[in-house]
Amino acid sequence: MAPKSKAPVYVLGVGMTKFIKPRGKVDYTELGYEAGIKALLDAGITYDDVDNGVACFCYGDSTSGQRVFYQFGMTQIPIVNVNNNCSTGSTGLYMGRTLIASGASDCALVVGWEKMMPGSLGSHWNDRENPIGTTYVMMAQTRGLSKAPGAPQIFGNAGREYMEKYGARKEDFAEIARINHAHSVNNPYSQFQDVYTLEQIMQSPAVHEPLTKLQCCPTSDGGAAAVLVSQSFLDAHPHLKDRAILIAGQALTTDAPSLFSKSSIDLVGREMTQRAAEIALGEAGITARDCQVCELHDCFSANEMCLIDALGLSEPGKAHEFVRSGAITYGPNTKVVVNPSGGLISKGHPLGATGIAQCAELVWHLRGWANNRAVKGTKYALQHNLGLGGAAVVTVYKRPDGQEASVLGSEEVGRVSWVGYNPAVEARGFTEEQADKVRSKRRSEFALTKTLQLMKQAQAKV
């Protein structure tokens, strides 16, 4: 059945916090609030314009979303809490777009955050079936189990299979990590901004062959947010059109029976990624190779290798050759710059925020604001976000005018942005005055201030 045509949906505003090590110093309420305020400021609207809220997080109590959103105003809009493993943030974007495209919303605020524990990911529920328990069983039956944490085993095994089938070498996976770490230097929101040689990557502590420590994403605390709007909303606010970026195609898919094919690459969701890419790229009317910039889910370098292949950026079985040629980074052989933000490996991976942070990065590129990491001739941007269990979200973005992005200087961006500086290249906080500009005005300022005071007092008592 042919996909139904969707009404246009635009990303009008984006914002994010700096991603930091999970040390419990910043609560989720602050992470979500900062990201949301920045997105509203960037969009040039107030919370009173928002008619639906989507809250994205994996670790936290039910209705944590309401706790975050009530800080913007208690306007009684629908607020939905989303948990879809590592693809939670982009699942929230998918839900927001679906609401707007269906006519159920004109302006949705999607906010994602995570306050994580240090160390490898683990289940918090030991008295019930693990949702990816069958994945571990299949891994044990095909490759056995090691003492390494579960996630690097699953993805590392996919890397091993890529080596066995197609001739990739350990150096190819290390090169992916080297590139992502190098890219992170230009992203002010990145958790790590260190440059490493290929040798340093390969000689970092072994985790699960071919993976070393510097090829694995860290756990992180952070928040990100996006404002999505309809065509009618944009038409009613024509002065905002210059910052809007069109979602040209998008798909959310789940696992296929191939998950249990005894292939380690299938076990990390190759087919659901391929299917999501086929749908999203088809809706946009392009191929992956028409994209100039891509943010993809490099939780481990091995996953990036498999994804370059599955998304169609390279020829099948040739992702390692694509990497060796310099095609995924800046230089004379560039085909598509992958993870200009530094990716999950270096930028960090606060689960609920990751997909929305990817969106923010690509929006900045298409606006021409990411001037310290711009990709020449950017016309289409590709996003991929994946969660085991499973879900894959692929999104294609483009400028509404269909033109290539013109790179703007930061002084010029500061004049047209609503914050007076270029948020793509400078990570700042926000002022109380800026927050007051975008919080709800439906109730009196006294009532809103009093509500915030009471919420802070209640939190202090606890």
Image (tube, rainbow, N blue to C red):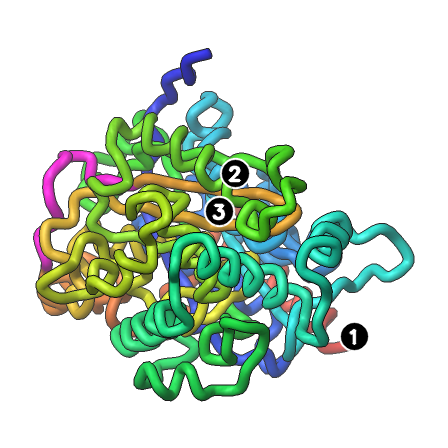
Side of 138 where 234 appears, left or right: left
Q: CA distance from mark 2 to mark 1?
A: 43 Å
Q: Residue at x 24, y 70 (%)?
A: 425
Residues in magenta, as a range:
397-407
For badge 3, the amino acid type reads Ser
Residue beneath label 3, please? 90
Rendered residue at 56%/45% (across/down): 266
| 43 left or right, relative to 455 | left
- Residue at position x 61%, y 51% from top? 388
Circle nearer the N terminus (2, 3): 3
Q: Which residue is mark 1?
A: 462
Secondary structure type for disc 3: helix
Q: Which residue is mark 2?
A: 272
* Rendered image: mark on residue 307: none
* Helix, strand or loop for disc 1: loop
Asked if the residue under mark 3 is in contact with the one under mark 2, i.e. CB atoms within 8 Å, the reply is no
Q: Secondary structure at mark 2?
A: helix
Q: Position of residue 272 (x, y in %)?
A: 52, 38
Quarter containing the C terminus: bottom right
Residue 441: x %, y % from top left: 46, 49
Q: Earlier in the sequence, mark 2 or mark 1?
A: 2
Separation of disc 1 and disc 3 at Cα? 33 Å
- In the image, what residue type sits under mark 2? Met
Dominant SS of magenta comes to: loop
Specify whether residue 36 is in view: no
